[in-house]
Image (cartoon, helix red, strand yellow):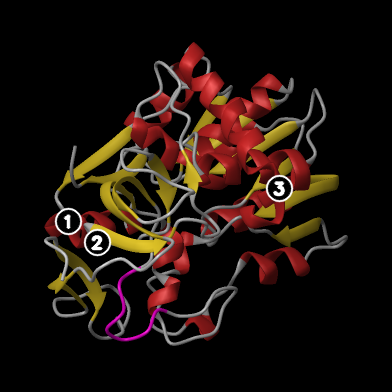
Amino acid sequence: MSNYTNRAVILNQRPQGEIKEGDLVLEERPVRDLKDGEVLAKVLWLSLDPYMRPRMNDAKGYMDPIGIGEVIVGESVARIVESRSDDLKVGDLVTCYSGWQEYVVFPGNAEMVYKIDQKDNVPLQAYLGVAGMPGRTGYCGLMYVGKPKAGETVVVSAASGPVGTVVGQTAKKEGCRAVGVAGGPEKCRYVVEELGFDACVDYKAGNLEADLKAACPDGIDIYFENVGGAVTRAVAPLLNPGARVPICGFVSAYNAEDMNSVETPFHVLKALDPVPEHRFFLVTEWQDKHQEITNILADRVASGELKYRETVAEGLENATEAFKGMLKGKNFGKQLVHIAD
């Protein structure tokens, strides 16, 4: 057997509503010996993302649910520590879907494993945030679904998070008016003063509809959907003819005990006349552009053009609490777990 011992967070039972004690459990597991063609990677940084919560439910979505006893899904930055593959050597840094664990074994030629060509002034963990999957999600959703034109108004919910951060700053680069929606005065101030948005509406302030209307005097041409619920309802009457709505997710509903009873952005948008152009999308639709877009975003991080924030939890044992907090908006920017150096 291998000399390594792994710790992993597994799905012990399916959460009913919010995650509770006993739903996710930290277990120790032995690491098996490598077969020919395989590598062993040590996880350095783990990404926590909202999509993980619906996958804990026993419901078929755009991806299969996590099985009971299985490791919680997630992307990480990892270092190869053993190799029996010609594709990856010891010391290589990669992004991979390791899940919530400290070590992972996979084929050296596995799909969705990408060697990191780290650029100067780009920290490793940025390849899980604005220069990683969330950043590519924001970029692709805006550019290929939203199709912004100079002079248009772009609104993005969860504006201080890694997806919203990229959407707003990319919209500004395309010559658009960028309006964020975020929770609390500190996040809103950051979105305008540091990220360079034209305005940011505090959905917690109690005047969402009026504040959003004041921030969008010419209506809304693109609404990038991350949140759902009250934000979507406030946006809907302001959508201009020809508006586009890329739907990335709707985190406000992810802790619902019965997803079938939730009002989704699709319900709100389909009730409008005319119905705006809208669709749910996955970043994997542009998998062939993975490296190209990663390089675009990493270059913007390296130059200081693309700004971002992070919230870091230390150690795998703190991942569950960090994840629960993220679903309630307690994080500021990208939520990460630092596991090893």
- The span picked out in magenta is 66-72
Residue for point 28% across, 58% down: 323
Residue contact at pointers 2 and 3, CB within 8 angstroms: no
Q: For the residue carrying disc 3, how many other residues have a C-alpha within 10 Å: few (<14), some (14-19), or many (20+)?
A: few
Q: Quadrant of the N terminus?
A: bottom left
Which residue has dot 1 on it?
316
Which residue has dot 2 on it?
101
Which residue has dot 3 on it?
288
Say above or below: 60 vs 322: below
Report whether 85 appears left or right of 167. left
For the question of whether residue 79 can be seen, the reply is yes
Residue for point 25% across, 86% down: 13
Report whether 173 appears left or right of 323. right
Using the numbered discs, state the Cα–Cα distance from disc 2 to disc 3 in whole angstroms. 28 Å
Say above or below: 19 vs 222: below
- 164 or 267: nearer the viewer: 164
Element assignment for label 2: loop
- 19 or 129: nearer the viewer: 129
Residue for point 74% across, 61% down: 279
Q: Percent x, y for residue 173?
A: 67, 20
Give the number of callouts: 3
